[in-house]
Image (cartoon, helix red, strand yellow):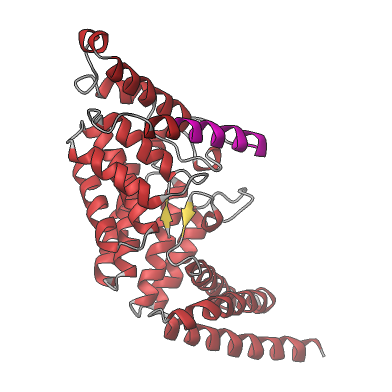
Amino acid sequence: MREVASPPSSAGTSARGRWLAVAVLGVATLTSSLGAAQPSVWEAARDPLVRRIDAQSLAAERLLQERVTSPADLVRVRLAVARLLAEIAANPPGAARSARLDAAVGALYSEPYVADYAAARAWLTRALAAAPPAPLAERAEFLLGVACAKLGDVACERGAYSRVLELATSPPDRATALMNRAEGRMLAGDLAGAVADFRQARRWASRPDLLSLVCYGLGVALDRSGNLPSALQTLLEARAAWTSTAPYSPLDDPDVFFVPPFDLYYYKGLEELAVARAAQVGLDPATAVAAFARAAGHFERYLVEAEPAGTPWVRHARAHLGLCRRAQAALAGGTAASQE
């Protein structure tokens, strides 16, 4: 599980306000931080190509701030992005590189309505090679981490988020980078490193929604490390941190993705197992039976895809599925007997 969008400290919007759009640094902040990288008035006057690249940079940054809240918005923005990318592709091959433009194009390729992560990685890598100012570098490194995760390049992802942590100072930025790096470490089998990163992220997570996501990841990492009791307790903390009035789970947030995608069912299965165990302790057998049934359903869906893929957590999922089925049957029998 990774969060795609950057934390609101740099994006300025909540996760719920970013449907289909990955927010970027505000144009005002970005422009002020790039003063040294922008052409001078005299350079722009001398070179029409410099003016053209500067205009393309501004156009890309404006598109990255578009809010897509309807199908009509999506069509409009996709057409505008396609036109701009075609214009940029027509720049002369020998044109001077602009870190600002390269970073903005890399961000556009990261948008869910484009989702060309190989192109995003290429443009972001080129932008970072120019050693841009820290605010631009931090955002580019973050998006590079997302692109590498989507491409399955765990080493690239881990390196990008490690460099974000060298630059980031705000608590949400640091928590998100640590959480995403932890997920990459867990995917690579480094469970100790994943648990350490998740615990650091929990200390930095100042927002309830971010704290909830961090606890979900920590709970799964603890479970896969063999500490099921702590895992289930942490998943209950994840549920408690989430806004109770939200119409969906943080695991279903459009800015959250899973590598591999079917890992979502492992997270949901383990969450329901935590709910079922808590209901057992609270002597609420009806709630426990329903939660065990939901947990079993999620683990079954996970295994349908995980077993052919040969993922390392199949054994854990099978064990949890067996536990859920046995507990559900025992509780259902006891409930039926008590009603006779």
Judging depth in this view, the residue of 51 and 25 nearest the camera is 51
Q: In the picture shown, does residue 19 fall above or below 218?
A: above
Judging depth in this view, the residue of 242 and 34 nearest the camera is 34
Specify the quadrant that holds the N terminus.
bottom left
Q: In the picture shown, does residue 294 fall above or below 171?
A: below
| Percent x, y of residue 170 | 29, 38
**Residue at image location 44% in from the left, 36% down from the top:** 23
**Residue at image location 24% in from the left, 62% down from the top:** 155
Q: Is residue 1 left or right of residue 69?
A: left
| Percent x, y of residue 134 | 21, 34
Q: Would residue 217 be seen by someone viewing this image from the given angle?
A: yes
Per the rendered image, the range of residues in magenta is: 69-84
All told, the count of numbered labels is: 0
Q: Please, what is the dominant secondary structure of the magenta stretch? A: helix
Quarter of the image where one finds residue 340: bottom right
| Percent x, y of residue 98 | 25, 29
Q: Would residue 175 be seen by someone viewing this image from the given angle?
A: no
Q: In this view, does 152 lie to the left or right of 338?
A: left
**Residue at image location 49% in from the left, 86% down from the top:** 318
| Percent x, y of residue 133 | 20, 31
Considering every residue shown, the one lying at the far right of the view is: 340
Quarter of the image where one finds residue 71: top right
Judging depth in this view, the residue of 54 and 14 nearest the camera is 54
Asked if the magenta segment contains residue 77, the reply would be: yes
**Residue at image location 49% in from the left, 45% down from the top:** 114
Q: Is residue 155 left or right of residue 307?
A: left
